[in-house]
Amino acid sequence: MVCLSSISLSGSFHPEVFLQPSGLESESDSAGLVEETTSKKIKMPGSVLITGASTGIGRALAFEFSRRGFALGLCARRLELLEELEEELSGENQVAVAHLDVAELESVPEVLNKLADELGGVSIIIANAGIGGRSYPGEGTFHQDRKIIEINVLGAMATIDAGADILKKQGGGQIVGISSIAGFRGLSATPAYSASKAALSTYMEGIRNHLLQHKIAVTVINPGFIDTPINTHRKSRPFLISAEKGAQLMADLIEKQVLSSTVPVWPWAVISRIMYLIPERLWCRINV
């Protein structure tokens, strides 16, 4: 049931709200950030598949879930970095790696199914692969915009589609999309990236009803500034946290099967609400 307090009088929905399953409590409950509950937490066999796992958030999540005892299925474009990561992760937990460029849409189901088979099944599938970059219309950067949409939107949708097929056959699980606070409003320096993340978040919101009928939880993670290569070009990275800290917070939220959350919750849940309230006439004058 949709909580009316998550819908403003203007009719705009705030997807950044920290949402949790019933029966789970948070330090942020008293701040009024929890506004909706979902179904009972699904029991997981303890394996996670991550796209874009060679660097950044994906790599940090691999270490974090390994620390928590999960078997790992890791894929990315740069196989040599994955193989190095596999060596670093070698221990008691199983690790399987595979080359995957999610922009090559036809190859996504084959690679994900192969990894799931190697792991003997998968409980969590994280659509993390993504790229960023500055671009401006009429400045000869459309080729970059196209690549961003191909990877961040179509590649993520292909991952989610193949993942949903795997999890339906297994009887349930969880699909996670790594979106961004950049998807809450159009950022002037990275409009294509903002559009790609807004599209991903909206798509995942749309598939949630259907997948819950198949016992598949859908979680959207909206990171703020995490110290990774995708944002090192920016002069300002407010409230920056390390990739390790970000991965820890994300893994906590994923294991709780929240519907949607900023990372960290504070201060981005509040900042994102303020972003929504800024009038368009003013927003278009802000260089972000």
Image (cartoon, helix red, strand yellow):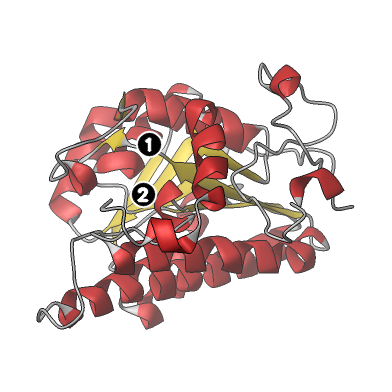
Label 2 sits on residue? 74
User: Which residue is at 55% across, 33% downward?
Assistant: 270
Marks 2 and 1, how far apart at CA:
8 Å
Q: Front-most of 287 and 84?
A: 287
Q: Earlier in the sequence, mark 2 or mark 1?
A: 1
Q: Are marks 2 and 1 in contact (CB under 8 Å)?
A: yes
User: Which residue is at 52% across, 38% downward?
Assistant: 262
Q: Position of residue 132 (x, y in %)?
A: 25, 59
Q: Position of residue 277 (x, y in %)?
A: 56, 49
24, above or below 82, in the image: above
Q: Position of residue 78 (x, y in %)?
A: 17, 56
User: Which residue is at 74% across, 61% downward?
Assistant: 11
Q: Position of residue 246 (x, y in %)?
A: 40, 29
Q: Amino acid at mark 1?
A: Ala
Q: Residues within 10 Å of mark 1 (few under 14, many from 20)?
A: many
Q: Secondary structure at mark 1?
A: helix
Farthest right residue in view: 1
Q: Amino acid at mark 2?
A: Leu
Q: Front-most of 81 and 33?
A: 33
Q: Is residue 93 visible?
A: yes
Say left or right for 92 vs 131. right
Q: Secondary structure at mark 2?
A: strand
Q: Front-most of 251 and 3?
A: 3
Badge number at residue 62: 1
Q: Front-most of 202 and 167?
A: 202
Q: Is residue 111 visible?
A: no
Say left or right for 64 vs 55. right
